Image (spheres, rainbow, N blue to C red):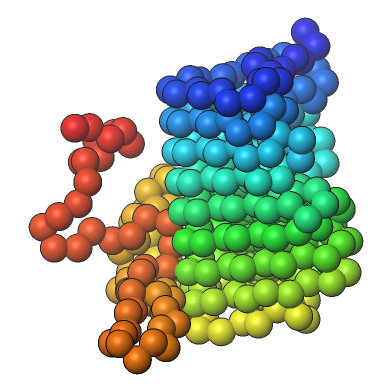
């Protein structure tokens, strides 16, 4: 029947852990989860096969944090610029993945910070979506912080600002843009844009971004870019969702600089990988991965 929001969090300071939300109707474009209250938190939650956004964090829902969440097969209505996650002011996503939102309008993440808002994606993945990996909205006026993220095999752009019309600061660092059908980064829309694209990796050969690495970047500085060898990706098996970084050209190739001018300091520099899932080094590491699940 008509779709409905499976869970609407209208009050503040909620915590959701290990929930799965799916199948919210046959018509309409209702979202799966909606966080309209402030300062909520979700961990290891999954949303799939819903008519609208998988997870909706509108600008009124300030300070929502999503950790290790997944959205796929969202936007079953194929409505414009709807997909896995809609991020409002103050939303932070860490190790979240949005994939296979396959309708021609399906985006991985839509960023809508509202007036002078902030959206952050850290160690996130957008792959194989029917439109953009990230899409900005016309209301996007504020700051995007995108660090160590992967944009792979999206039908349109990895990141797309063409719908935005306000002033936008974008800081994009240590991210991969590989095999997207448009540009890796398309900044042709924002009326005023500034920021940096620093030490990001780009595909070549069969893994090239069809419309080029970047487009419309006036006001944005691009530096330290890495172009991978033809036909290679930096990951273990991205077609099957394994984004562990295995290509040497992406390992320790990210930016890890610190500014330290005090005379008593000898200096600090880090050597991060480019991408969301750093390579395992030495004999350390976290819990093993079995069948796509962490086990202790």
Place residue 198 in its image quadrant.
bottom right
Picture quarter with the C terminus: top left
Q: Where is residue 161 in the image (x, y as percent from the top left)?
A: 77, 62
Q: Which residue is at 37% across, 55% downward? A: 277
Picture quarter with the N terminus: top right
Q: Can residue 97 be seen in this view?
A: no
Front position in the image: 28 or 123: 123
Place residue 54 in its image quadrant.
top right
Relative to 205, 192 lies left or right:
right
Q: Which residue is at 88% across, 61% downward? A: 165
Q: Position of residue 227 (x, y in %)?
A: 49, 80
Q: Where is residue 278 in the image (x, y as percent from the top left)?
A: 33, 60
Relative to 142, 155 lies left or right:
left
Decide: is 34 above or below 131. Answer: above
Q: Where is residue 31 in the image (x, y as percent from the top left)?
A: 72, 25
Place residue 255 in its image quadrant.
bottom left
Q: Which residue is at 71% across, 43% downward? A: 88
Q: Can residue 142 be seen in this view?
A: yes
Front position in the image: 63 or 96: 63
Name the residue at the left extreme. 283
Decide: is 26 above or below 254. Answer: above
Decide: is 34 above or below 227. Answer: above
Name the residue at the top extreme. 1
């Amino acid at each position: 029947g008509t779709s409905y929001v499976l869970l609407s969090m209208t009050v503040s300071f909620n915590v959701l852990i290990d929930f799965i939300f799916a199948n919210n109707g046959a018509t309409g474009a209702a979202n799966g989860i909606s966080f309209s209250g402030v300062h909520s938190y979700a961990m290891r939650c999954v949303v799939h096969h819903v008519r609208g956004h998988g997870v909706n964090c509108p600008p009124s829902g300030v300070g929502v944090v999503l950790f290790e969440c997944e959205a796929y097969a969202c936007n079953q209505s194929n409505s414009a610029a709807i997909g896995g996650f809609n991020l409002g002011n103050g939303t932070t996503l860490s190790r979240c993945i949005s994939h296979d939102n396959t309708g021609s309008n399906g985006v991985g993440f839509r960023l809508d910070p509202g007036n002078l808002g902030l959206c952050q994606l850290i160690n996130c993945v957008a792959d194989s979506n029917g439109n953009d990996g990230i899409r900005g909205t016309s209301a996007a006026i504020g700051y995007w912080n995108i660090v160590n993220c992967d944009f792979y095999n999206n039908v349109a752009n990895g990141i797309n600002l063409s719908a935005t019309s306000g002033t936008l600061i974008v800081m994009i660092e240590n991210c991969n843009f590989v095999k997207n059908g448009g540009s890796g980064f398309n900044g042709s829309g924002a009326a005023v844009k500034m920021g940096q694209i620093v030490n990001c990796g780009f595909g070549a050969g069969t893994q090239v971004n069809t419309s080029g690495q970047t487009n419309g970047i006036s006001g944005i500085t691009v530096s330290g870019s890495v172009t991978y060898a033809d036909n290679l990706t930096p990951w273990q098996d991205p077609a099957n969702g394994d984004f562990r970084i295995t290509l040497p050209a992406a390992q320790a190739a990210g930016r890890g600089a610190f500014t330290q001018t005090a005379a008593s300091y000898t200096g600090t520099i880090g050597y991060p990988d480019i991408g969301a899932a750093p390579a395992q080094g030495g004999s350390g590491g976290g819990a093993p991965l079995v069948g796509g699940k962490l086990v202790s």
